[in-house]
Amino acid sequence: MIDIHHHLLYGLDDGPADREAAIALAEAAIDDGITHVVCTPHANTKYKFNPQINRERAADIKAAVGNRLHIGLGCDFHLSFENIEQCLIEPSRYTINGGGYLLVEFSDFGPPPNISEIFFQLMVKGVRPIITHPERNPVFQSKPEGLTNWLRIGCLMQVTAGSLAGRFGNRAEKTAWKMLEKNWVQFVATDAHSVERRPPCLSGAWRAIDSRFGRKVADRLCIENPRAAFENQELGPQPEPEGIHVLPEEAKKPGLLARLFGRR
């Protein structure tokens, strides 16, 4: 399994405080059957985001665990003016392994009013936003249909593995499963922070999805799509999401949803 949202780097944000805790977190991921991890420290006004330090910390952890875990780099991207401005100039600073996928986290107060324009600008630059854990956001728990405009223009979605098991409350659990049922979700990730508080348990989510939707869906969400993001490849064919309303002028274009969601 491949985990594209994981706070593994130590001493940078609210993830592990030191090297020992980070190595323990990496070992827990390995024990869970995770083979690849994208280290995603917060990039916001509270925590300083420094790609050079990120690379050094990742290399340090890699030296400790060896080839048992493939370690990549990205970030938990917050939509501050400075971040957006810098990302439009230098997208690879923030994207997963310098490629075309960017994890985007909304605040609990909801997205900024010009977010559709921001997403459009990012996609023009070759960056495809992945909206992280919307099922845990109070705004989208109340009005999940607010996500459909961004899905329609080609954004992707990631839910947290723990949400599917109720670790973030009943509303997050129900919202996450409903999003999966509607084919809105392309990635499941752990958003791990520590062994005790937020462990890297992706296998439980894989089993739960397998039980409800079958192995093909579980593999797509926990292995195949995450591998494409890790390796900066296009996603394979995806089921068309339900409830995505195409604008009249777009409906005239052949295969709009097919192009957005990987159908050939």
Image: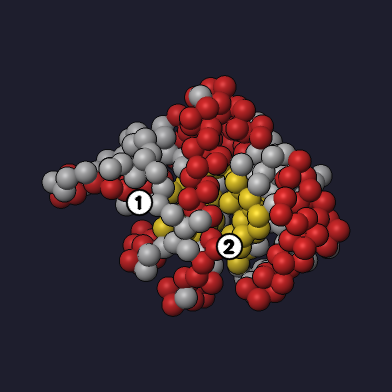
Residue 242 in sight: yes
Q: Going 49% across and 37% down the picture, which residue do you hit?
A: 220
In the rendering, at what x and y percent does residue 197 appear? Answer: 78, 45
- Left or right, 137 with respect to 113, comes to right
Type of the residue with mark 2: Gly
Q: Foreground residue, 146 or 176?
A: 176
Residue 146 in sight: no
In the image, is residue 219 above or below residue 60?
above
Q: Residue furthest top?
A: 211
> Which quadrant does the N terminus fall into?
top right
Q: Nearer the viewer, mark 1 or mark 2?
A: 2
Q: Earlier in the sequence, mark 1 or mark 2?
A: 2
Type of the residue with mark 1: Gly
Q: Going 38% across and 65% down the picture, which residue do you hit?
A: 126
In the image, is residue 252 above or below residue 232?
above
In the image, is residue 99 above or below residue 138?
below
Q: Are there few (<14), some (14-19), or many (20+) residues within 10 Å of tag 2?
A: many
Residue under label 1, please give it: 154
How many discs mark residues in the rendered view?
A: 2
Rendering quarter of residue 53: bottom right
SS type, badge 1: loop
In the rendering, at what x and y percent does residue 111 appear? Answer: 47, 56
In the rendering, at what x and y percent does residue 92 appear? Answer: 50, 70
Residue under label 2, please give it: 74
SS type, badge 2: loop
Rendering quarter of residue 184: top left
Q: Foreground residue, 156 or 139?
A: 156
> Which quadrant does the C terminus fall into?
top left
